Amino acid sequence: MNLDLFLIGSEFSDDQGTIHFLLSWVMLYRFAYVLMWVTFKIFFRRIDVVGLEKLPKGKPVILIANHPASFLDAMVLAVFLRRSLHFYVRGDIFEHPIAYRILTILHMIPIYSKEHGDGILEKNKRTFDRGRKLLSKGKMLLVFPEGFSRLSKELVPLKKGAARVALQTAFGDGQQTDLHIQTVAINYSWHGRGASLFIRVGENMQIQHHQEKYLTNPAQAINALTLEMQELFHRNVIHIEDGSRTEMAEELMRMHYRQPFYKVDGFFEEARTICDKVAGLQEQYYHEHVGLMYKYQKILLRWRTNDRRVASSHPSVKNLILLFLVLPFFVAGFIIWFIPGTVAKWIADKTVTRIDFYTSVYTGILGVMGLLWWIGLCFAGWDVNNWIGLTLAVLSPFYAYLALWWLDMLKRELAHLRFRELEAVDHHLAEELTKMRAKLVFE
């Protein structure tokens, strides 16, 4: 890890004390990377990343991504894109000098809005300078061009900041004309534990054709590039024309996840198709669809089964055997990790008021509490049985992963059994559920 990258554009860059401080914490970024990788693997039911081969190698890149889940979006991209990533975050969390230094080590760059008080233009000028200098060294900078996180999948006009940084980097003093603007789509099946995470690296573009315009009229060049980025963004993220129909589109995407023939490589196109179909429904038919969805879910709830069972085949003998074999690990994982897992969820439930912040806060608390709990387990393991106890404690996060997997699998198999009971008691209703589902997913 190059220490210079932490100091670029920083007011502390000439402070020897700060340099020594950063040297002593140089592994913090890698440590945080491993911690969040483990946390995400436990928290999400499945994680799919497609298109990594499209990321330009050895070249400066500005990532533009949709922003559905607050600061979690930057963290999942930093972990799963397999390349060092720098990103902008709200500037008020940088106010304390220690926070400034640690967050800088974690590749965060402050950006300010009007609510942060006077002097934001000068502060943001330094922010954009830092981004430009990072790009001039061939690094990757993440920008959320819509400006703020939100649940709605309706696109809003892009801010001009990304275009400004790109043009200044490409045609300013650094002359990084090989800079790429790369799109990334992020989708969570819902905001909570057991959700599925989907990341798709999409198309990218270069900007050499804006050079002449930028050198003669920078403002026009920034506007033109922003419009071109808007078109690129529109083609490469999952979005819906009518934001008020986002919830229905997301429910249908979740149903698509549960199809037995689900293929990750085709999910992006299928999700886009679902959004287009939902947006294209006439008002009357849309409300009929909403009513049908409500009726479908109400029947599933009454019979304590689920949509996955309606979509898939009969219970798997292999799964039942796996449940039996993994049972001891479930018991161990449940007993060991019940307290930090429950407390983390309780804190998130009590403190978060916006759904798009929920998963961010939940995973952050879970990661920190899990780390402290794991350290305590390691000390206790060593105290009880030296190396054997320590080894078992070190591996304990794997027990937590298996415990959650076991619970999910148990719920799935119980849903299978309850649906079989429904078929025996009311075969007509079971068939009706299958027809309702087919109509909901536009089959």
Image (cartoon, rainbow, N blue to C red):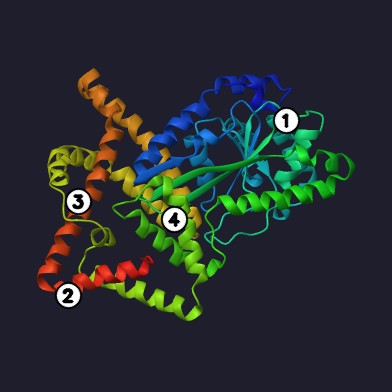
Of 356 and 212, nearer the camera is: 212
Picture coordinates of residue 65, whole percent (x, y): 58, 47
Q: Residue furthest front?
A: 443
Please tell me whether mark 1 sits on a helix, a strand or a loop: helix
Above or below 282: residue 408: above
Amino acid marked by disc 1: Lys
Q: Which mark is residue 202?
A: none
Of 317 and 231, nearer the camera is: 231
Q: Which residue is mark 2?
A: 428
Picture coordinates of residue 324, whole percent (x, y): 12, 42
Q: Are marks 4 and 1 in contact (CB under 8 Å)?
A: no
- Crowding at dot 2, Cα within 10 Å, few <14 / some 14-19 / many 20+, comes out as few
> Is 44 displayed left or right of 75 in the figure?
left
Q: Which residue is mark 1?
A: 133
Of 329 and 12, nearer the camera is: 329
Name which quarter of the figure residue 369 lies in: top left
Question: Which one is in front in this view, the residue at disc 2 or the one at disc 3?
Answer: 2
